[in-house]
Amino acid sequence: MDKTAFKKLYIYCNISLVLAAFISGLSFVAQKLGMQYVGPFTFNTLRCLIGTMALFPVMFFYSTNQKYSLKGGILAGIVLFIAFSINQYCMIYADAGKAGFITSLYILFVPVIAIFLKHKLASNIILSIFIAIIGLYLLCAKGIAQFEVWDIFLLISAFFFALHIIIVSHYSKKSDAIKLSTLQLLTAGVLSLPLMIYEQPTLNLILAGWKPILFIGVVVTGVAYTLQIFGHKATKAVIATLILSSEAVFAVIGGVLILGETLSIKEIVGCLIMLIAIVLSQIPNKGGKNEKTNN
């Protein structure tokens, strides 16, 4: 691929990641509504299997001839299942603001894993990560001084979300995004099924909450996670993580527009700091090839 074509792909991938973050950020209301009708594992099973069914026709009619990795899809699905399960269960008990901040610490785990895998990080990326964490704290953290046991599990889920990003980043380079996304969601959905049966959900409750469940399954799980996989094709994992972390900003904006919430000065400053961090991550290093030196 020549330099011009790569730059175009890089821009498209970044746009895909922003859209994925936008969808995920604005999905908070629907996610809360869905949990009013079903348990966490039932919710995860339905969102993954609905997402899988939504992607099947797209996979057959619009997917490219690019090969897909069976190993990559299953591995990504297993890790996503673990992350979803831990995180969704903790959301029953944990404070939403603090849970959002701790979960967002995948932004720190991804570069740590990348360094462990012997990838080099440019200085502006390292600075962007720490700036973004400060922004996330101002934006999300409420009652952070109070320690609870659920915080440990939320931190574990953040690690698995980070691991999922690393896996997707690796396998998305040579795999069809739709096929890879479909396989990972199918894997996560099948693994969640026994836990759903344990909760003994009723059909009446599922049907009562069909609107938020369907929205989360099709738009958030099916569309956003596919956009995320496509975004990794030219955008390295650490930069992609910074862009995806902007979902916290979109979540706050969604609360203002949909729920009529107001922003505090601290939250406004947090949003601005997050945006600064993302812009800073896009500045090329001295070699002018920021995207090729960071993972």
Image (cartoon, grey):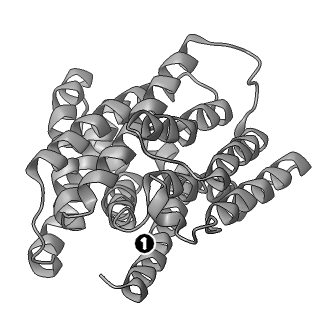
Q: Amino acid at mark 1?
A: Cys
Which of 91 and 32 lies nearest the eye of the viewer? 91
Res 9 → quadrant: bottom left
Q: Residue furthest right?
A: 265
Vertical position of residue 184 compared to residue 99: above or below: below
Furthest residue to the front?
Answer: 287
The percent position of residue 238, horizontal first and vertical second, equals 50, 51
For mark 1, give the secondary structure: helix
In the image, 244 versus 46, the foreground residue is: 244
**Label 1 packing within 10 angstroms: few (<14), some (14-19), many (20+):** many
The residue at the far bottom in this view is 4
Q: What percent of the width, then of the height, locates residue 181?
A: 24, 57
Residue at which label 1 appears = 13
* 69 with respect to 223 (left or right): left
Answer left or right for 207 relative to 275.
left
Q: Quadrant of residue 221?
A: bottom left
Position of residue 42 relative to residue 131, above or below, is: above
Left or right of 54 on screen, residue 84:
right
Residue 290 seen in render: yes
27 up-or-down from 149: above or below: below
| Nearer to me, 87 or 232 | 232
Residue 236 x %, y %? 43, 58
Nearer to me, 128 or 224: 128
